[in-house]
Image: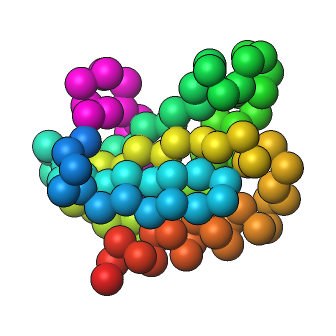
């Protein structure tokens, strides 16, 4: 099942009560889905990644890791993935493993 992406700014808003997982390469925030199907949003801040090519690379890495670990995402949750600068130095396998560990923490 292909997940939809969050596009509206207001849909990115989370509350302090929403669960958050911090990783060396990214931050994941989860909140209850407004609709039945879950979505995800990607954030690569211009303040952190000055060049558009770096922002695009960070988002491309996150998309790859999400596609690989999609089976671990709950269908009733929306996820926000925030890239950290260290993501650019991460290997594909390590990133996939770290994202899997982060998503497993939400199922507890």
Q: How is the image coloured?
A: rainbow
Asked where in the image residue 69 lies, by quadrant, the reply is bottom right
Tell which residue pokes out farthest to the bottom in this image: 108
The answer to whether 76 appears left or right of 62 in the picture is left
Evaluate whether residue 33 shows in this view: yes
Name the residue rendered at 52%, 42% in the picture.
Answer: 82
Name the residue rendered at 35%, 71% in the picture.
Answer: 106
Q: Is residue 28 above or below residue 100?
A: above
Task: Give how far across and how far down residue 10 sits, in percent.
Answer: 24, 24
Task: Give how far across and how far down residue 65 sits, in percent.
Answer: 64, 56
The answer to whether 25 appears left or right of 21 in the picture is right
Whether 74 is among the magenta residues is: no
Name the residue rendered at 41%, 76% in the picture.
Answer: 105
Task: Give how far across and how far down residue 101 sits, in percent.
Answer: 55, 75
Evaluate whether residue 37 shows in this view: no
Q: Is residue 100 above or below residue 2?
A: below
Q: Is residue 85 above or below residue 79?
A: above
Name the residue rendered at 59%, 51% in the picture.
Answer: 26
Asked where in the image residue 59 lies, by quadrant, the reply is top right
| Count of numbered marks | 0
Whether 6 is among the magenta residues is: yes
Asked where in the image residue 93 lies, by quadrant, the reply is bottom right
What range of the chain is rendered magenta?
3-13
Q: Give the quarter of the figure containing the C terminus.
A: bottom left
Q: Nearer the viewer, residue 57 or 48?
A: 48
Q: Nearer the viewer, residue 2 or 79?
A: 79
Q: Give the quarter of the figure containing the N terminus.
A: bottom left
């Amino acid at each position: 099942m292909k997940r939809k992406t969050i596009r509206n700014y207001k849909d990115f808003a989370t509350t302090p009560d929403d669960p958050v997982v911090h990783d060396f390469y990214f931050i994941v925030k989860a909140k209850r889905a407004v609709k039945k199907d879950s979505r995800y949003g990607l954030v690569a801040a211009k303040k952190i990644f000055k060049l558009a090519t770096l922002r695009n690379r960070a988002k491309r890495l996150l998309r790859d890791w999400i596609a690989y670990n999609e089976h671990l995402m709950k269908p009733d949750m929306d996820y926000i993935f925030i890239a950290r600068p260290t993501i650019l130095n991460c290997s594909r396998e390590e990133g996939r493993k770290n994202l899997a560990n982060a998503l497993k923490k939400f199922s507890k």
